Image (cartoon, rainbow, N blue to C red):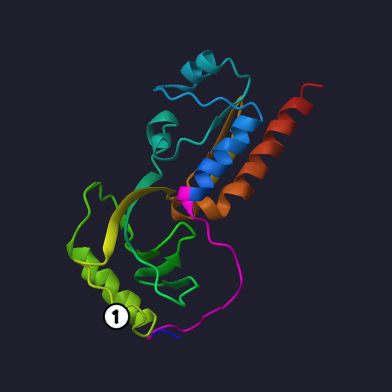
Amino acid sequence: MPPGATIGFTYSGLAVDPSMFLPWIAQKLVDRGVKFVRGKVESFQEMQNLSRASIVVNASGLGARELASDDSSISIRGQTMLVRKQDGFDRAVILQGSQYTYVIPRASGGVILGGVSQPGNFAVDPDMALRMDILERVNSMTKGEFGWVDTDRDVSRDIVGFRPARKRGVRVQREGNIIHAYGAGGLGYVYSWGMANQVLGLVENHYKAHI
């Protein structure tokens, strides 16, 4: 157990590598006839006019604050760094508490070391001072397994992202012909299949109500 931890679990599971998962799932959708269109919309009515869809799913993430007038939607900044994969290291380790520390190997190569959780911070550029802070926490958690990392030599990429969270929790809800699905924060990949299944149920109930 890492210092300060009061409870822990070990289990076998799946780790999602976004650089592989997103192209894969996008191609699956294209194969089923889905068309991707990039554009800017400022209202659901505009979206319905553009798509000619009877139902619009609002999975706009951070955009929900303006698009859905949801003041509880917030941005939580995250920062991680990608280092080369250490021989023999094949597990993910996560420590949750007052700080958010994790090590996640990527199938496409390297290991993600993180991280931070910064609500309301919109800085796009990486904070270089966080590198050593993250590395020190990672080594404390893993008993020094990444003591070989030199942040000036071994970091191949700094990654900054903005997690679309919501103070009131995840929202999956239907309002007329609009289905909202957002607010998962840093758990988007974890919740995505379950949220999608709930959205499907709301769509099917919509059509049953009109039979």
Image check: 127 left or right of 175? Answer: left
Image mark count: 1
Pinpoint residue 46: horizontal percent, then vertical percent.
47, 16
Q: Which residues are magenta?
A: 3-19
**Residue at the spot 33% in from the left edge and 83% down from the top edge:** 144
**Residue at the spot 46% in from the left edge and 61% down from the top edge:** 106
Pinpoint residue 126: horizontal percent, then vertical percent.
22, 54
In this orientation, which residue lies closer to the viewer: 20 or 139?
Answer: 20
Location of residue 208 by image quarter: top right
- The answer to if 18 sits in the magenta stretch is yes
**Residue at the spot 66% in from the left edge and 30% down from the top edge:** 32
**Residue at the spot 63% in from the left edge and 19% down from the top edge:** 54
In this orientation, which residue lies closer to the viewer: 6 or 69?
Answer: 6
Figure check: 145 above or below 65 = below
For the view shown, which residue lies furthest in the front direction? 87
- The answer to if 71 sits in the magenta stretch is no
Image check: 31 left or right of 145? Answer: right
Figure check: 32 above or below 62 = above
Q: Is residue 56 visible?
A: yes
Pinpoint residue 129: horizontal percent, then vertical percent.
17, 64
Q: Is residue 168 visible?
A: no
Residue hosting label 1: 147
Figure check: 158 above or below 177 = below
* Secondary structure mostly taken by the magenta-highlighted segment of the chain: loop
Q: Which amino acid does the dot numbered 1 rest on? A: Gly
Image check: 81 left or right of 90? Answer: left
Figure check: 43 above or below 113 = above
Q: Secondary structure at mark 1?
A: loop
Location of residue 9 by image quarter: bottom right
Q: State the quadrant of the N terminus.
A: bottom left
